[in-house]
Image (cartoon, helix red, strand yellow):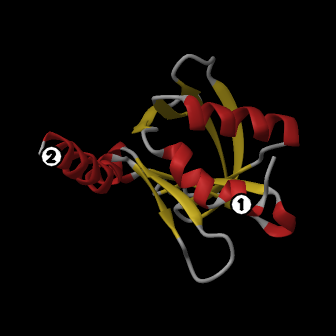
Amino acid sequence: MTRLAATSLACLVALVAPAFADWRFDPGLGGSGYAVGEGSNDIGMVLDCGNGGLPAVSIEGHDPGADTEIFVISVTGHPEELWSASCDRASCLLDLESMERARRFLGQVRSGSEAQIGLYRRGSLSVMSLRGSGRAMAASVDRACPL
């Protein structure tokens, strides 16, 4: 009887645990899908494989009123970094600059607990939990554009 109760509890936890994750996999309309994280102030981060199988990271929900923006992003346990971005209204695509920098940043997102997103010399924009980012990335980025 105890074994049945333990098995039932394990199944319940397995079903409910993904609901507590702050990141999710969005299959999109074909392709590899997206890893999506929601932060404070209606700001989100989207990770996917861009053209040519290279990783792409965008900050969603911030309209700088210009076609470029500079973000300051810090992941718990790592120093903050400046990221230039090309923006189209409220969607800003980060310039990952190199595969090495992309690997490092995606590794930080996967293993970190929180990301703080700010605007260069203009303060904080959003705080985002990274809980569940590894699972969401495994379903999208890792499959389509392995680093």
Does residue 93 appear left or right of residue 123 in this picture? right
Q: Is residue 51 above or below residue 22?
A: below
- The residue nearer to you, when weighing 139 against 130, is 139
Q: Which quarter of the figure has residue 47?
A: bottom right
Residue 143 numbered mark, or none: 1
The N terminus lies in quadrant: top left
Q: Amino acid at mark 1?
A: Arg
Residue for point 15% across, 46% down: 5
Residue 5 numbered mark, or none: 2
Question: What secondary structure is marked by label 2?
Answer: helix
Q: Amino acid at mark 2?
A: Ala
Using a 10 Å C-alpha cutoff, classify the residue at mark 1 as few (fewer than 14 neighbours), some (14 to 19) or many (20 or more).
few
- Find residue 69 and report its horizontal and vertical position in percent: 64, 46
- Find residue 139 and report its horizontal and vertical position in percent: 59, 60
Does residue 57 appear left or right of residue 123 in this picture? right
Furthest toward the left, the residue is 1
- Find residue 145 and report its horizontal and vertical position in percent: 78, 58
Furthest toward the bottom, the residue is 29
Upstream in sequence: badge 2 or badge 1: 2
Using the rendered image of the protein, determine whether residue 98 is visible from the camera's viewpoint: no
Residue for point 75% across, 54% down: 55
Question: What secondary structure is marked by label 1?
Answer: helix
Q: Nearer the viewer, mark 2 or mark 1?
A: 2
- Find residue 29 and report its horizontal and vertical position in percent: 58, 83
Does residue 127 appear left or right of residue 78 in this picture? left
